[in-house]
Image (cartoon, rainbow, N blue to C red):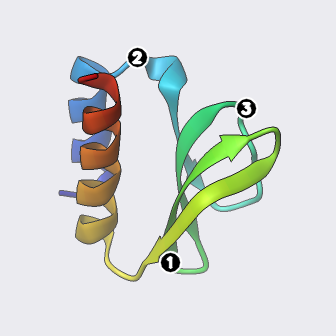
Protein backbone atom coordinates (compact mmCIF):
# COMPACT_ATOMS: atom_id res chain seq x y z
CA UNK A 1 0.00 0.00 0.00
CA UNK A 2 1.25 3.49 -0.75
CA UNK A 3 0.22 6.88 0.67
CA UNK A 4 -2.37 7.56 -2.03
CA UNK A 5 -4.02 4.16 -1.52
CA UNK A 6 -3.88 4.66 2.24
CA UNK A 7 -5.67 8.00 2.05
CA UNK A 8 -8.37 6.60 -0.23
CA UNK A 9 -8.95 3.64 2.09
CA UNK A 10 -8.96 5.74 5.25
CA UNK A 11 -11.42 8.23 3.79
CA UNK A 12 -13.92 5.40 3.37
CA UNK A 13 -13.58 3.98 6.89
CA UNK A 14 -12.15 6.54 9.34
CA UNK A 15 -13.32 10.06 10.29
CA UNK A 16 -11.12 12.60 8.48
CA UNK A 17 -10.45 14.56 11.67
CA UNK A 18 -8.96 11.45 13.31
CA UNK A 19 -5.80 11.29 11.20
CA UNK A 20 -3.23 13.45 9.50
CA UNK A 21 -0.71 12.53 6.84
CA UNK A 22 2.15 15.02 6.81
CA UNK A 23 4.81 15.31 4.14
CA UNK A 24 7.78 16.69 6.06
CA UNK A 25 7.98 19.37 8.67
CA UNK A 26 7.05 19.29 12.29
CA UNK A 27 3.32 19.81 12.37
CA UNK A 28 1.55 18.55 15.45
CA UNK A 29 -2.18 18.33 14.90
CA UNK A 30 -3.95 17.96 18.22
CA UNK A 31 -5.39 14.61 19.32
CA UNK A 32 -4.74 12.99 15.94
CA UNK A 33 -3.07 9.86 14.57
CA UNK A 34 -0.24 10.94 12.29
CA UNK A 35 1.89 9.51 9.55
CA UNK A 36 4.78 11.84 8.78
CA UNK A 37 7.27 11.45 5.96
CA UNK A 38 10.50 13.01 7.14
CA UNK A 39 13.99 12.66 5.63
CA UNK A 40 13.02 9.54 3.70
CA UNK A 41 11.58 7.80 6.77
CA UNK A 42 8.01 7.29 7.85
CA UNK A 43 6.90 8.15 11.39
CA UNK A 44 3.72 6.89 13.02
CA UNK A 45 2.56 8.58 16.21
CA UNK A 46 -0.40 9.96 18.07
CA UNK A 47 -0.14 13.71 18.46
CA UNK A 48 -1.31 14.73 21.89
CA UNK A 49 -0.81 18.34 22.97
CA UNK A 50 2.13 18.68 20.60
CA UNK A 51 3.85 15.53 21.87
CA UNK A 52 4.54 12.46 19.72
CA UNK A 53 3.13 9.51 21.65
CA UNK A 54 3.80 5.90 20.58
CA UNK A 55 6.37 6.89 17.96
CA UNK A 56 7.32 4.15 15.50
CA UNK A 57 9.63 4.63 12.52
CA UNK A 58 9.63 2.77 9.23
CA UNK A 59 12.03 2.73 6.27
CA UNK A 60 9.43 1.26 3.94
CA UNK A 61 6.30 3.07 2.70
CA UNK A 62 4.25 -0.10 2.44
CA UNK A 63 5.05 -1.19 6.00
CA UNK A 64 4.29 2.28 7.37
CA UNK A 65 0.97 2.52 5.51
CA UNK A 66 -0.14 -0.98 6.52
CA UNK A 67 0.76 -0.30 10.16
CA UNK A 68 -1.02 3.08 10.14
CA UNK A 69 -4.14 1.61 8.56
CA UNK A 70 -4.29 -1.36 10.93
CA UNK A 71 -3.79 0.83 14.01
CA UNK A 72 -6.58 3.20 13.00
CA UNK A 73 -8.88 0.38 11.98
CA UNK A 74 -8.45 -1.37 15.32
CA UNK A 75 -8.99 1.91 17.18
CA UNK A 76 -12.21 2.74 15.38
CA UNK A 77 -13.69 -0.77 15.38
CA UNK A 78 -14.05 -0.57 19.18
**How far apart are labels 2 and 1 at the CA level?**
25 Å
Q: Nearer the viewer, mark 3 or mark 1?
A: 3
**How far apart are labels 3 and 1 at the CA level?**
22 Å
Residue furthest to the front: 78
Q: Nearer the viewer, residue 72 or 6?
A: 72
Residue displayed at 49% across by 69% down: 56
Q: Which residue is mark 3?
A: 30
Label 2 crowding class (10 Å Cα cut-off): few <14, some 14-19, many 20+? few
**How far apart are labels 3 and 2 at the CA level?**
15 Å
Residue displayed at 57% across by 65% down: 55
Residue 15 location in percent, x, y?
Answer: 40, 17
Task: Name which of mark 2 and mark 1 comes first in the sequence.
Answer: 2
The secondary element bearing badge 1 is classed as strand
Residue 15 drawn above or below residue 66 = above
Residue 73 drawn above or below residue 61 = above
Compared across the picture, whether 49 is left or right of 11 comes to: right
Q: Which mark is residue 41?
A: 1
Task: Name which of mark 3 and mark 2 comes first in the sequence.
Answer: 2
Q: Are marks 3 and 2 in contact (CB under 8 Å)?
A: no
Amino acid sequence: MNIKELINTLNKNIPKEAFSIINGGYQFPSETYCLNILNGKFEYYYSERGIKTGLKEFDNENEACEYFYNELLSEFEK
